[in-house]
Amino acid sequence: MTAPMTAVPTSMTDTAQTPDTPDTITTLNPATGAVLAHYPSQSPAQIEQAVALAHAAALAWGRQPLALRLATLERLAAALRAQKDTFAALVTAEMGKPLAEAAGEMEKSAVTALYYVAQAPRLLADEPVEIAGMQPPVQAWVAHEPIGLVLAVMPWNFPVWQVMRFAIPSLAAGNGVLLKHSPNVTGCALALQQLFVDAGFPAHLVTTLVVAEPAVPATIERLIADDRIAAVTLTGSNRVGAAVGAAAGRASKKSVLELGGSDAFIVLDDADVQAAAAAAVKARFHNAGQSCVCAKRFIVSAGVAQAFTDAFVRGTQALVVGDPTDPATQVGPLARADLRDALARQIAQSVAAGGQLLAGGQALPGAGCYFAPTVIAGAQPGMAVFDEETFGPAAAIAVAQDDVHAQALANATPFGLSVSVWSGSTERARQLAQGLTTGAVFINAVTASDARLPFGGTKKSGYGRELAAAGLREFCNTRSWWAVGAVA
């Protein structure tokens, strides 16, 4: 059997856009269109070797004391900070995120690692259960134990953070990670594998698979069916999530799916409109709008709709779009040309359906995948920008006649990830949000993920949770213990 492949790029100098082949992944710089690298796709034999080594490493890691696992996790936090600039440059080159935002992924990951260093001893501790009145006496407890090797199918939009928010708690729990990252961030995926080794994790405990796009569906289905894979997690589209969830169901394996969203940002008539508008610009256009948890549908009470819209459009038009390596840039390119084209289609269809284009609306000329920050007013159910997830810098504004109407508009979506409600009354905002189906509610704040709170969705936004105690225990065997007689 051949040795596992490190997937060293075969070329780093090409400048023409070269399409992927069944045997090669080609990464492109979305800011310029230049080729970054070619990576050979792993053969079935190489994937088999990688899985065998990863499975053995995961079993050995699960037998290590929790204190040792957490000490290694603490070193990971230091490594994330030490390599911040190198990783930020790689993230920016591969998917176009402004450098400051890319560096932010590293810091957020480091903070999350330290959170679990501090909290995992409590969260993973055995939980005694009182069993009274039995003879002979009984001692019972609940343990949270590792399950083995977890397959992670991850997206490109947060190349470091998406991986870390799953991998950090999974490694703390004693599991291994088999990573199949998005092809356009293959360089990041391989660098992450090396980062874990640099931090002192055992070789092969975090293993990256390099699989060219044509072979991905069959490879993932085969891996999920493999007895050495204990569970699977995916962040991605509904189409891919349905396939992964179905495969996990056939194999009777745990799965966690985070499938995107079309989050509502609700502004009630007693809100601080200027503060809400300023926050709305950040909520929509961070990472060029390429986030499942970005606010996408802005539902505004009629009494403040004009004031909010005016302030929001001014803020949108003031955004600096440009080279993501320039510190002044606030919005970089979209990650791929097909994403730019899909957004253009959604906007054109929405304008044809009656939406009013207030800003942007088109791809920007020149090299790269740039798109003008866009605002569409008069949005309503039936329009693409309202019904579909818009993965790019486009905001849809809908006007609500009252709180009941705002609630109905917010619920008029197949997604259910999060909602942000702005009001002068926390109780009023809470009552409105209680009528919505989402995984999170943020009142007078922009939706965000945080290691201290569970993160995940409802409806077509998926199921399962990442982060906090829930994320740590998602990939644990919650085992009941019952012992008759004295237990040392």
Image (spheres, helix red, strand yellow):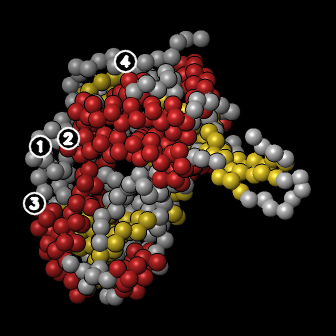
Q: Is residue 127 above or below residue 276?
A: above
Inspect the image, locate mark 4, and give the three-letter code of the amino acid beneath it.
Val
Which callout, 3 or 4, points at the residue further toward the start of the chain? 4
Closer to the camera: disc 2 or disc 4? 2
Separation of residues labelled 2 and 3 (CA atoms): 19 Å
Separation of residues labelled 1 and 3 (CA atoms): 16 Å
Which callout, 2 or 1, points at the residue further toward the start of the chain? 2
Tell me where residue 337 appears, x and y as whole percent.
28, 43
Separation of residues labelled 4 and 1 (CA atoms): 30 Å
- Any mark on residue 327, and which? 1
Inspect the image, locate mark 1, and give the three-letter code of the amino acid beneath it.
Pro
Q: Residues within 10 Å of mark 4 (few under 14, many from 20)?
A: few
Residue at label 2? Answer: 99
At a point 44% along the width and 62% down the height, the residue shown is 417
Separation of residues labelled 3 and 4 (CA atoms): 41 Å
Q: Are marks 1 and 3 in contact (CB under 8 Å)?
A: no
Give whichever of 42, 109 is nearer the camera.
109
Element under disc 2:
helix
Residue at label 4? Answer: 8
Tell me where residue 378 appears, x and y as whole percent.
26, 76
Q: Looking at the image, can residue 212 be seen?
A: no
Q: Are marks 2 and 1 in contact (CB under 8 Å)?
A: yes
Which callout, 2 or 4, points at the residue further toward the start of the chain? 4
Quadrant position of residue 77: top left
Residue at label 3? Answer: 318
Which callout, 1 or 3, points at the residue further toward the start of the chain? 3
Give whichever of 286, 488 is nearer the camera.
488
Direction from residue 472 to residue 429 in the image, left or right: left
Total marks drawn? 4
Inspect the image, locate mark 3, and give the three-letter code of the amino acid beneath it.
Ala
At a point 46% along the width and 75% down the height, the residue shown is 436
Closer to the camera: disc 1 or disc 3? 1
